[in-house]
Image (cartoon, rainbow, N blue to C red):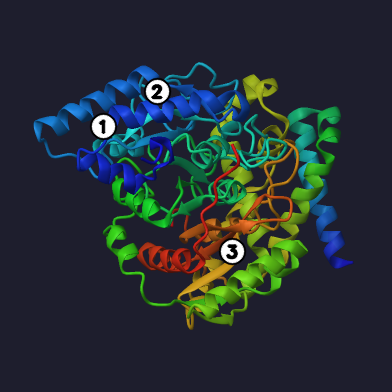
Amino acid sequence: MAGERITADIFETLAAQARLLWGEADAERQRPALSQTAEEIAVLVRATVPADLEPKFFA
Amino acid sequence: MTALHTLGVAEVAALVQQREVSPVEVATACLARLEALEPTLQAWVSVDRHGALAAAKRCEQAIQRGDRIGALAGVPVGLKDIIYTAGLRTAAGSRVYANFVPTYDATVTVRLQQAGAIILGKTVTTEFATADPSPTRNPWNTEHTPGGSSSGSAAAVAARMIPAALGSQTGGSTLRPASYCGIVGLKPSYGRISRYGVIPVSWCLDHVGILVRSVQDAALVLQAIAGHDLHDASSLAQPVGNYSLAVQQADTSPRLGVLPDFFRDHADAETQQHTAAIVERLAHAGASVREVPLPPSYATVLAAHRILMKVEAAAFHADMFMTQREQYGPRLRETIEMGLVIPAVDYLRAQRLRRLFQQEVPQMFQDVDILVTPSTPTPAPRGLGTTGDARFQSPWTHAGIPTITLPTGLSQAGMPLGLQLIAPALEEERLLRAARWCEVALNVTLAPPL
């Protein structure tokens, strides 16, 4: 349930941004892709990242 | 004598150096093969017949003069159409870049030319090397996809139009089409081959890949194009290995690690059974085999990979996309649209999780030299509506570690199957040595019925 709520929250954030960028109709068209992206972000959000781990872009 | 268009890189290079064949004869034979099969396979965007024959003539004259020639002298090659070629259109499979003619060569283009290779032209890519399929057909069965995004490079090498081609890999775009078409595909460590002058998908994930028909040929091409490049910020400063020597020293049986969980669960039954039989043959030939568990961070790899790719593709395309959105194919359009709305903190979380995976990957090699998996979950799917599934390659592209696929046989439907070998970062010599050992032990060479 917690996972579903997180995913739903993420989806709403992404959908709101899509509506701002493209308008209601386009954001609706993008719903399946937004939903998949929300699920991917939820996987990342649920994972533990060590606090001192910095990103490394090249390598 | 063997038909010249069927010769591999090493064979052409040796015969040219020994003056047994002329580079013009080889280029002419490959061009004839290309022109005969191209209407069926659609592997090429542009063929530079005049330029290729002129380069072959110059090479021939250099040999006649007794000049010192490069390791790939007279070897015809194709370049994926995202690789810059000065004065030769580089359209990236896109309407947006339809008339783009670069004013300079990519570093890999320069290095191939310096090694004496003859560039026949540009091979078909999916749109901007992403997921919208190309028109290219699989030489084994034209009703099947050749895979992507290096579709034309894989089909052209498999069909014996050329002995070698360059592709790229951001997820699985070199190894997957290589496996689907029954050839060898090599993706070295991130930064080993310069990306300067290669149109990007994702700066942190893009690799240049090599498509050939033997491990020795992969080593020869890698030797010619690997190495530091001041033009590419991601280029490795570490010294280049002796790859040609590595494949000559492939007499020690490797310690192989098989990954049972994810890769067994996601492969179809035929691929699972085939891979198990191949690993058994390798064990019978002397390889030691043990199961290796995936590290904890593997659970986030595919999600993190997709987030990075979407955001970086969106960053590259953003300006063009805002004014030419309708010119983009549906899948790339969706990728960019998603990348534009993903929060920056989530992108950075994906980068941090990628680094965590990179830190955990070496644990997998504690007791083995090489990891092996099926190259793809299934043989090449029927139809041209998809380029196939990249999830068996993208974890290793994500980590930036070297991988190679070898052809290992045919499915019941007559489509190629392959074995993917994976080595630790910067260990291309180890990878090529083990791949050559496996190639000899399996003794499989596939040629499509064309």
**What is the chain identity of the residue bearing mark 2?**
B
The residue identified by callout 2 is: B102
Task: Classify B97 as above or below B438.
Answer: above
Asked if residue B402 shows in the view, the reply is: yes
Q: Amino acid at mark 1?
A: Ser
Q: Residue furthest right?
A: A1
Dots 2, 1 in contact, CB < 8 A: no
Q: Amino acid at mark 3?
A: Leu
Ranked by sequence position, the earlier of labels 2 and 3 is 2
**For discs 2 and 3, the disc positioned in front in the rendered view:** 2
Task: Classify B364 as above or below B146.
Answer: below
Residue B378, image x, y percentages: 71, 55
Q: Nearer the viewer, residue B310 or B36?
A: B36
Q: Amino acid at mark 2?
A: Pro
Q: Nearer the viewer, residue B316 or B427?
A: B427
| Quarter the C terminus of chain B occupies | top right
SS at mark 2 in the image: loop
Q: Residue at x 54, y 79 (%)?
A: B283
Q: Residue at x 64, y 31 (%)?
A: B134
**What is the chain identity of the residue bearing mark 1?**
B
Q: Is residue B37 left or right of residue B166?
A: right
Task: State how many labels appear.
Answer: 3
The residue identified by callout 3 is: B353
Whole-angstrom CA distance, mark 2 to mark 1, is 30 Å
The residue identified by callout 1 is: B22
SS at mark 3 in the image: helix
Residue B193, image x, y percentages: 37, 48
